[in-house]
Image (spheres, rainbow, N blue to C red):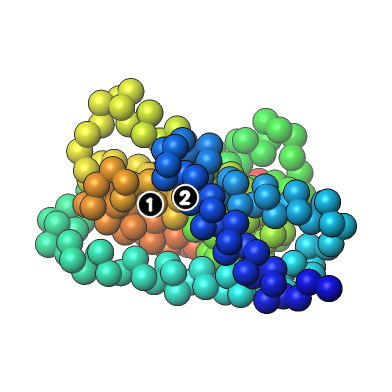
Amino acid sequence: MITGLMYLILTLVLYLLAKRLYRSTGNMLFSPLIVTPLAIIGFLLLTGHSYKSYNAGGQWLTDLLQPATVAFAIPLHKNFKVLKKHAAEIAAGVLSGTVMAVLSSMLLARMLHLSGDLATSLVPRSVTTPIAMSISQSIGGIPSITAVFVIMTGVLGSLMGPSVLRLFRIDNEVARGVSLGTAAHGTGTSKAFELGSLTGTISSIAMILSALFSIGLTPTLFAVFLH
């Protein structure tokens, strides 16, 4: 019988292998965020094991999401002067991006004819996972489904983001960081660090600000437009 610890080890091994594959190919389709969940799902389907039994070990990784988010404070401290210089632009960009993310999620829910729990679970998709799950619960969504939408948003943002930035010839590091951090949260921030240290740092603060703005704005916008 596989224990929670063994599931945890399996997840870590799959992630490390996927990370090596991604680094060797450079293809975002081989990102650990895509390969690892698919491999785990395949393993559970083939063995007939339940998600509940897997989560006995996987939950430990989920619990590390919040301290991992706090760890972004390190590059923020190193680039504090730059952040202070562009504070107004960053705040304005993140605020407008957050509002558009929430409204576009509501529009997408209507276009797909989603209703009830699915619609509310989709709304906080552009926020980092632990906060998105909390927002989802507060507006009547299903946190676990929200987590899936968050991952999908992050992966798509990382895949499409750099191409969109090149298409519109956005090469300013502050603008690139705000775009990726606001639209694709932690996954976008990871991609932003590949583009440059400052871009990643700006993306980190954008991700955090987006989460804070979303906590305050999402319930209000949700009540106005979906109720």
Depth check, front residue: 66 or 118 = 66
Q: Residue at x 52, y 73 (%)?
A: 64
> Which residue is disc 1 drawn over?
189
* Disc on res. 30: none
Q: Earlier in the sequence, mark 2 or mark 1?
A: 2
On screen, residue 210 above or below 22 = below
Badge 2 crowding class, 10 Å Cα cut-off, few under 14, some 14 to 19, many 20 or more, is: some
State the image coordinates of residue 208 (x, y, percent, origin top left).
38, 61
Q: Position of residue 4 (x, y in %)?
A: 72, 75
Outermost residue toward the top in this view: 167
Quadrant where the N terminus is found in the figure? bottom right
Helix, strand or loop at disc 1?
A: helix
Q: Nearer the viewer, residue 141 or 191?
A: 191
* Residue 145 in view: no
Give whichever of 67, 29 is nearer the camera. Answer: 29
Q: Secondary structure at mark 2?
A: helix
Find residue 118 and report its horizontal and vertical position in percent.
73, 48
Q: Nearer the viewer, mark 2 or mark 1?
A: 2
Q: Is residue 26 above or below residue 16?
A: above
Q: Point out residue 74 in the picture as x, y percentages from the top left corner.
A: 27, 69
Viewer-nearest residue: 210 or 193: 193
Instruction: Residue at 54%, 53% (x, y): give it.
Output: 17
Q: Residue shown at 78%/71% (left/top)? A: 2
Q: Amino acid at mark 2?
A: Arg
Q: Compute the Cα span from label 2 to label 1.
A: 19 Å
Residue to which mark 2 is pinned: 20
Q: Residue at x 61, y 52 (%)?
A: 36
The reply to whether residue 11 is visible in this rendering is: yes
Would residue 156 be found to the left or right of residue 170 on screen?
right
Amino acid type assigned to the residue bearing label 1 in the image: Thr
Quarter holding residue 25: top left
